[in-house]
Image (cartoon, helix red, strand yellow):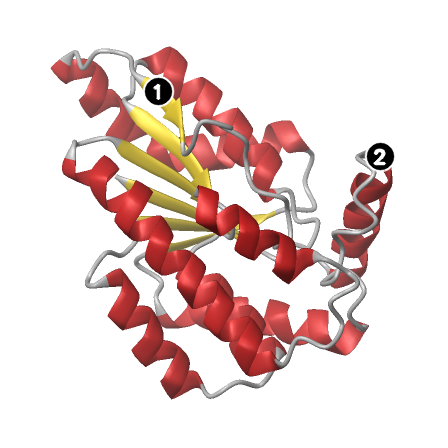
Amino acid sequence: MFITFEGIEGCGKTTQVERLVKRLYREGVQLIRTFEPGGTEIGETIRRLLLDSHNKSIAPLTELILYIADRAQHIEEVIKPALYEGKWVICDRFFDATVAYQGSGRGQDMELIKILNERVTRGIRPDITFLLDCPVEMGLQRAIRRNKALFRDDQDRFEREDMNFHSSVRKGYLNLAQSDKKRFIIIDASLDEDEVERHIYKVLQQFVDEVIKKGSPIKASGSSARGQGGKEGT
C-alpha cells in the first residue's frame, strides 16, 4: 500500500500521519513513514532552500524544478525500495502537492508539471490519497501557531503567501479530488483530531485486516536515519 496525505497549510496532515503510523505499527503492518520535501539526505538540503523565508527571490520555475528534484531522489532512495520489499509507505505529500501548489498556486504550466511528475515517478502512484480539507483561514491560524511553538519562523515561506495563493491551492486540491474520486478520500479537517483519525482508519480497516490475517511481522522504520515526519503545509 502506498498512502499519501495532502492538504493546505495547517490542515493537520502530519498529526494524522503520526497517529496512523503508530496505529498501524500496533497492528503489525510493515511500513515506513516518509515525507516531501526532505525525505532523503539530499532532500533535506532542498527542503531548507524551499522553506527558508529569506529566499524570497526563488522563481516559480526554480521552485517547481527543486520539488521535482527532491521527488526524483525520494522515489529512487526511499519509496521504490520500500514498495519492492512489500512495505506500506505512508507519505506526507507527494506529486499532488506539486499540482496544487506550483500549478494552481503559482500558475506554472500544468502540462509541464504532468510531464515532470510522470518522468520521475515512472508509474508509481498512491493507492489512496487522504485530502485533509479545511477553510484557508483556519489552516493558516493553525500553521502560524505551530511555527511559533516550534520556533520555525524562518521556515515559513509558504505561510507568508497571501490569501489568494492559499485559496488557489485549496481549490487545486479539490479539483484533483474531483477528477480522481477512486483514489482521493476527502476528510473534513475542521473536525477534532480524534474524529479525523477515526475517519481515516475506517477507510483502511479492511486492508489492515488482511495484513493481520496473513500474520505479517511487525517492522517499521523512518524514511531516513533522522526518522522525522514532514512539516505541515510544505
Q: Nearer the viewer, residue 83 or 173?
A: 83
CA gap between label 2 and label 1 equals 28 Å
Q: Which mark is residue 56?
A: none
Q: Is residue 51 above or below residue 150?
A: below
Mark 1: few/some/many CA within 10 Å (<14, 14-19, 20+) = some
Q: Nearer the viewer, residue 192 or 66?
A: 66
Classify residue 169 as left or right of residue 85.
right
Which residue carries the number 2 mark? 149
Q: Position of residue 80 (x, y in %)?
A: 23, 45
Q: Residue at x 77, y 70 (%)?
A: 161
Quarter of the rendering containing residue 125: bottom left
Q: Is residue 29 above or below residue 156?
A: above
Mark 2: few/some/many CA within 10 Å (<14, 14-19, 20+) = few
Quarter of the rendering containing residue 206: top left
Q: Nearer the viewer, residue 92 or 43?
A: 43
Which residue carries the number 1 mark? 220
